[in-house]
Amino acid sequence: MLQRALRLRLGPYLSGRGLGTYRGGSTLDWDGKVSEIKKKIQSIFPGGAWSPLYDTSHLPPERSDVVIVGGGVLGLSVAYWLKRLEKQRGAIRVLVVERDHTYARASTVLSVGGIRQQFSLPENVQLSLFSAEFLRNINEYLAVVDDPPLDLQFNPSGYLLLASEEGAAIMERNVKMQRQEGAKVCLMSPEQLQKKFPWINTEGVALASYGLENEGWFDPWCLLQGLRRKLQSMGVLFCQGEVTRFISSSSHMETGSGEQVTLKRIHEVHVKMDRSQEFQPVECAIVVNAAGAWSGQIAELAGIGNGPPGTMQGTRLPVEPRKRYVYLWHCPQGPGLEAPLVADPSGAYFRREGLGNNYLGGCSPTEEEEPDPGNLEVDYDFFQEKVWPRLARRVPAFETLKVRSAWAGYYDYNTFDQNGVVGPHPLVVNMYFATGFSGHGLQQAPAVGRAVAEMVLEGHFQTINLSPFLFSRFYFGEKAQEHCIL
């Protein structure tokens, strides 16, 4: 009975999930009251325009319909689609809270900027196809009057995934599904591979899959800045600060089997201002958790996972930061301009960077090799010992490469099934998720943002059915396992 209740999103109580008025009335009512207060003060002190005694321009508003925690590409995409799909212009007030407006540690700008449709789940293929169309027509979506058009510098060189004998059958099944979903992907034998890319050593390769359309890489920073520029023109508010607390109310219901379930609704978000002990409470109707690698901590602040083990209340959001290294090297005799992003069965990958025989790449560590996520220091020994030998085995020209620089970034790693978490929480009824994509969030952000906005505004997914990505799967043990993680 509990499962049925949760799957039905806990009945009539949740019919009020969406953007109803929060406590204290509507945004327009509040704005009207502020205006009246200003006029009264002016009447007491005549002779000058209204000027506040204390500068509050750096503070977030006291009320917002939606508060989005996290100003990376996923959070910005949610904000964009909320404003694009709103029924009346200006109807929804959206606030984006980001603790680092320089984005120095943001996963968005520290990624390699790839996009592909070569996944093992149909939903991920659909998400990336939608996002590819969005990126291909970026200026139809994000153009701002009198501002120059965006140039994402998209390089459509494709992805080339290599499979050993052991993984060949799985690759065949994946490619069959990808084609059914509309992706343009072909299979290549070792002989075909050698002919098309003579710089590859095909030893140990039984099969390859190659993306023919809508795959390659682009400039993540350009997408991020393009979204911010567009959102500012749409009236979205931004605040540099850190969410430190949620104020919520609770109600209780009893299922048919007699089990007690506590439902919570967040009414207020506390935002601690940057480099200050000052904080601003923001009343809200909806909270979107798009905090990336730190979204698990934001969920804990809302009380998610704070309950008896084995219950929905005790089910935590299994997303944590995982550090990944990206290395940049030079190799004069390396693969030419036709080189795609290559993913080796060993886990190593690389792509070209620019036109001067420079390359980006790396390799995800094993569980035993996972580095400390407490800092973004780079381990160059990891390249020497784990990455370089695998690269040189696959591309003999890389024997002579020279590393020029490197950096580290974070995956918002979903330890349960390495897949995204999208949509509402079953018990904290007005918190929605857009997180946990474990390395493919950037490329799927345009589609995920639309999916979350549809759920907030309409109560269900419309464009792409992402029900397998709902939070409830963690409680029910229903994995949406994505096997093609780079």
Image (cartoon, helix red, strand yellow):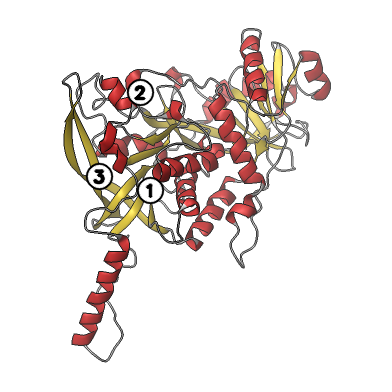
Q: Amino acid at mark 2?
A: Phe
Secondary structure type for disc 1: strand
- Residue 474 tag number: 2
**Residue that appears at 64% across and 16% down:** 171
Q: Residue 343: horizontal and vertical position, in percent?
A: 64, 24
Q: CA distance from mark 3 to mark 1?
A: 13 Å
Q: Amino acid at mark 1?
A: Ile
Q: CA distance from mark 2 to mark 3?
A: 22 Å
Q: How would you rate the neighbour count of disc 3 (Cα within 10 Å): few for under 14, some for 14-19, many for 20 or more?
A: many
Q: Amino acid at mark 3?
A: Ile
Q: Earlier in the sequence, mark 2 or mark 3?
A: 3
Is 30 left, or right, of 211 in this rendering?
Answer: left
Q: Which image quadrant for residue 389?
A: top right
The nearer-to-camera label among 3 and 1 is 3
Q: Earlier in the sequence, mark 1 or mark 2?
A: 1
**Residue that appears at 72% across and 12% down:** 203
- Residue 68 tag number: 1
Name the residue beneath numbered marker 3: 266
Q: Nearer the viewer, residue 25 or 159?
A: 25
**Residue 59 visible to an observer of this rendering:** no
Q: Nearer the viewer, residue 381 or 298?
A: 298
Q: Residue 108: horizontal and vertical position, in percent?
A: 51, 43
Residues at marks 1 and 2 touching, judged by CB atoms closer than 8 Å? no
Is 319 left, or right, of 113 in this rendering?
Answer: left
